Amino acid sequence: MSRHVLQAVGLVRRYGGLTAVDHVDLVAPQGVITGLIGPNGAGKSTLFSLLTGVEQPDEGKVLLDKSDITKMRPDIRSRRGLVQTFQVPSLFPTLTVADNLLVGAENRHRDYAGGLLGLASKGRGHVSRLVEETLGSLGLSDLRDTIAGTLPTGALRLVEFARALCAQPDILLLDEPASGLDNDETARFSQLLRRTADDGVGILIVDHDVDLVFSVADQVYAMVGGRVVASGDPGHVRDDPTVRSVYLAQAAHRHDETVLKQPQEAR
Ligand SMILES: Nc1ncnc2c1ncn2[C@@H]1O[C@H](COP(=O)(O)OP(=O)(O)OP(=O)(O)O)[C@@H](O)[C@H]1O
Ligand SMILES: [Mg+2]
């Protein structure tokens, strides 16, 4: 089986005199949860946009399975297996949960030239089976006919995630997927991330909840001022002096001593 991998090679993005992303290299492989952390303004969202294709780099490349996708539009990237969820859930509010998932599934299975009616060879039966299976495996079957716009935040985020899964991603890019979730929901969500990665999906997660990222990720990249200042296994990154000073300074500012707990406490 070929291994899918998303790679950033020397990515640079400048806004006027400011270098928001400064020569960033990153590798997010299939079956692995890669976390991206950094204080406000570190360049996380800009890097994320370069990977999804929402923004173009000034220098460097984005590679998917070694092919250069730097110039490829976001929708084409998603049909290639690079699927994203959004910080603000982007479901169709007037459609049911099941129909939202169907849109996600059809996006991937539509053939390249076929447009709206051109479902690829696997066809509609396959797509509706996929939707029902995904609803079932995420415990969402009871909500299948609920109008998405009426759901509370926790359910909405889960449906957004389910829709992304229906696009059968090789690599899933998650921007702040746990924002607005309570502690129980966050714990369940991190189990779901693990299960998804164990099923072979590569996950890149950007989240302000560093405890979530450190507890769920297999590898972490820490950005400060547009640069990657530390990367590797979570314990190594957590103990990095630059990372510690940034987060401890932030914690002191917030009078909050809960950041950067030891991993066993954070789990
Ligand atoms: N469209 C833009 N035009 C000008 N400057 C921008 C633009 N987008 C981002 N920046 C700047 O680039 C830097 C990195 O921003 P970015 O949003 O990527 O950081 P971030 O790590 O996602 O921060 P946060 O944790 O607050 O979401 C910041 O200084 C920001 O002000
Ligand atoms: Mg951001």
Image (cartoon, grey):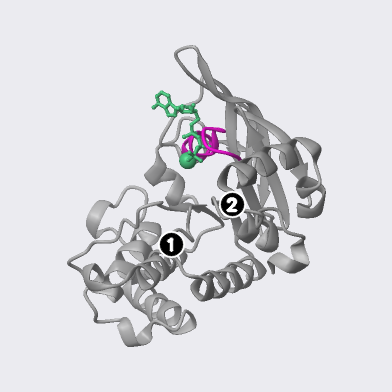
- The residue that disc 1 covers is 164
Badge 2 amino acid: Leu
Q: Taking 267 as reference, is 87 above or below it?
A: above
Query: Split into 4 quadrants, where in the image is the C terminus?
Result: bottom right
Residue drawn at (53%, 69%) of the image:
186
User: Could you tell me how many numbered marks the image carries?
Assistant: 2
Q: Would you identify the image quadrant in which residue 89 lies?
A: bottom left
Nearer the observer, 254 or 92: 254
Mark identifier at residue 204: 2
- Pick out the residue farthest to the top: 17
Please state the extent of the stretch shown in magenta in the rendering. Answer: 37-49
Q: Position of residue 169 (x, y in %)?
A: 51, 59
**Marks 1,2: beta carbons within 8 A:** no
Q: Nearer the viewer, residue 234 or 3?
A: 234
Q: Who comes first in sequence, dot 1 or dot 2?
A: 1
Q: Is residue 170 above or below residue 101?
A: above
Mark 1 residue crowding within 10 angstroms, few (<14) / some (14–19) / many (20+): many
User: At x 47% / y 53%, what residue is drawn?
Assistant: 83
The answer, for residue 1, to whether it is visible in the render is: no
Classify mark 2: helix, strand or loop.
strand
Asked if ligand 2 lies within 8 A of label 1, the reply is: no
Which residue, as the protein is rendered here, is positioned at the far front? Answer: 255
